[in-house]
């Protein structure tokens, strides 16, 4: 019986920020007897609450959720780390006879789970701090220019503001002497369950999505985002950690350093999140097996569209 259970589909509900992934993921989990695995690179961090849209207990509706709120904000947690932890959770969930439901907006996490990355050296913290210092003084664009000179093929793969992966590519070169673009083919074999992941991507109307993003971002500031970040910094969270590099958190840090007004931080945060949503749309359109669901995840129309496409047996 367990062997049969392991052959069941695994579902991934993905899409841009604010598209209603949580609502649809929970409804699907309740329908097929599933448990949710978070696939969002910000919701993993402890204490990073207000601007992350972590599901409340009410929103979870009793459905078990995994890989949320469990990583120290000062840890440089990678996509490979998440893929390892997610694979472990998938095994545990299926061993209980339940269905894993991956829910989130970090497409790189999902791709890393399905197509494992090459093996890379452990992070050199001193080297990481050097690149962070360069980014702080000269900006993400300077790091990208460095990568363009040293590994142009890798530079084409990463956007200029994707400082996390740009730094990782630079670190790999400095630590190993090999360009990261040259070793991308040195991947491990995909896990057994990779071929069973069925990907669904939410596709809400852009104008309504951007309006929702603007209102939600304003709400984060009203709910005490600035105070949350002040508390995190006072507790020892590093200002230039990955955890505080996301959207509004980055702009609030700039406000606290006196680099922009609070009003400007709010408006810039809105723009950042809208731009992020655009990049998420672009990323998921490159996933050839994605099934697109037009609308928000909490709409009845989307559920009716999804229902014939899934199997609970």
Image (cartoon, rainbow, N blue to C red):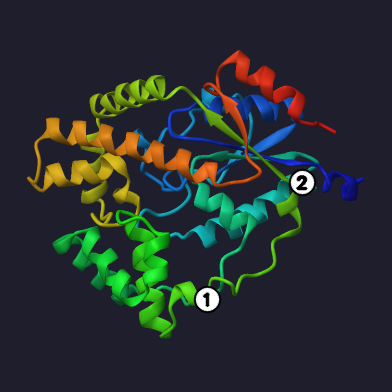
Q: Residue at 38% across / 21% down in the picture?
A: 207
Answer left or right for 291 relative to 156. right
Residue 184, located in which quarter of the rendered image?
bottom right
Residue 286 percent coordinates (x, y): 54, 47
Residue 204 percent coordinates (x, y): 49, 24
Label 1 environment density (alpha carbons within 10 Å; few <14, some 14–19, many ≥20): few
Q: Which mark is residue 236?
A: none
Secondary structure under the numbered disc 2 in the rendered image: helix
Residue situated in front as seen by the camera: 244 or 113: 113
Label 2 environment density (alpha carbons within 10 Å; few <14, some 14–19, many ≥20): many
Name the quadrant of the C terminus. Answer: top right
Residue 225, located in which quarter of the rendered image?
top left
Among the two numbered marks 2 and 1 on one chain, the one whose residue lies closer to the N terminus? 2
Q: Residue at 59% across / 75% down in the picture?
A: 186
Provide the residue designation for mark 1. Answer: 183
Residue farthest top in this picture: 300
Name the quadrant of the N terminus. Answer: top right
Provide the residue designation for mark 2. Answer: 94
Res 230 visible: no
How far separated are the C-alphas under marks 2 and 1? 33 Å
Res 171 visible: yes
Q: Residue at 19% across / 59% down in the picture?
A: 139
Residue farthest bottom in this picture: 177
Residue 227 percent coordinates (x, y): 21, 36
Residue farthest right in this picture: 1
Disc number lying in front (2 or 1): 1
Residue 222, located in which quarter of the rendered image?
top left
């Amino acid at each position: 019986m367990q062997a049969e259970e392991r052959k069941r589909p695994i579902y991934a509900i993905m899409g841009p920020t604010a598209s209603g992934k949580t609502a649809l993921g929970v409804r699907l989990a309740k329908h097929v007897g599933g448990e949710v695995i978070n696939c969002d690179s910000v919701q993993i961090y402890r204490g990073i609450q207000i601007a992350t849209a972590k599901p409340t207990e009410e929103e979870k509706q009793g459905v078990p959720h995994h890989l949320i709120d469990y990583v120290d904000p000062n840890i440089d947690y990678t996509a490979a780390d998440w893929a390892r932890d997610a694979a472990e959770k998938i095994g545990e969930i299926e061993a209980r006879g339940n269905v894993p439901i991956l829910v989130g907006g970090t497409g790189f996490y999902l791709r890393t789970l399905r197509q494992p990355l090459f093996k890379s050296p452990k992070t050199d913290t001193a080297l990481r701090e050097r690149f962070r210092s360069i980014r702080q003084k000269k900006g993400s664009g300077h790091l990208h220019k460095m990568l363009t000179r040293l590994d142009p093929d890798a530079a084409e793969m990463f956007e200029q503001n994707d400082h996390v992966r740009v730094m990782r590519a630079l670190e790999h070169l400095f630590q190993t002497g090999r360009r990261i673009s040259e070793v991308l083919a040195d991947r491990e074999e995909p896990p057994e369950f990779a071929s069973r992941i069925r990907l669904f991507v939410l596709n809400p109307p852009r104008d309504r999505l951007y309006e929702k993003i603007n209102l939600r971002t304003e709400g984060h500031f009203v709910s005490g985002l600035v105070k949350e970040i002040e508390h995190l910094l006072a507790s020892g969270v590093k200002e230039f950690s990955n955890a505080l590099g996301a959207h509004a958190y980055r702009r609030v840090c700039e406000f606290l350093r006196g680099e922009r007004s609070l009003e400007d931080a709010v408006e810039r945060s809105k723009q950042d999140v809208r731009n992020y949503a655009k990049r998420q749309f672009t990323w998921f359109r490159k996933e050839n097996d994605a099934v697109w669901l037009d609308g928000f995840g909490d709409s009845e129309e989307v559920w009716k569209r999804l229902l014939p496409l899934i199997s609970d047996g």
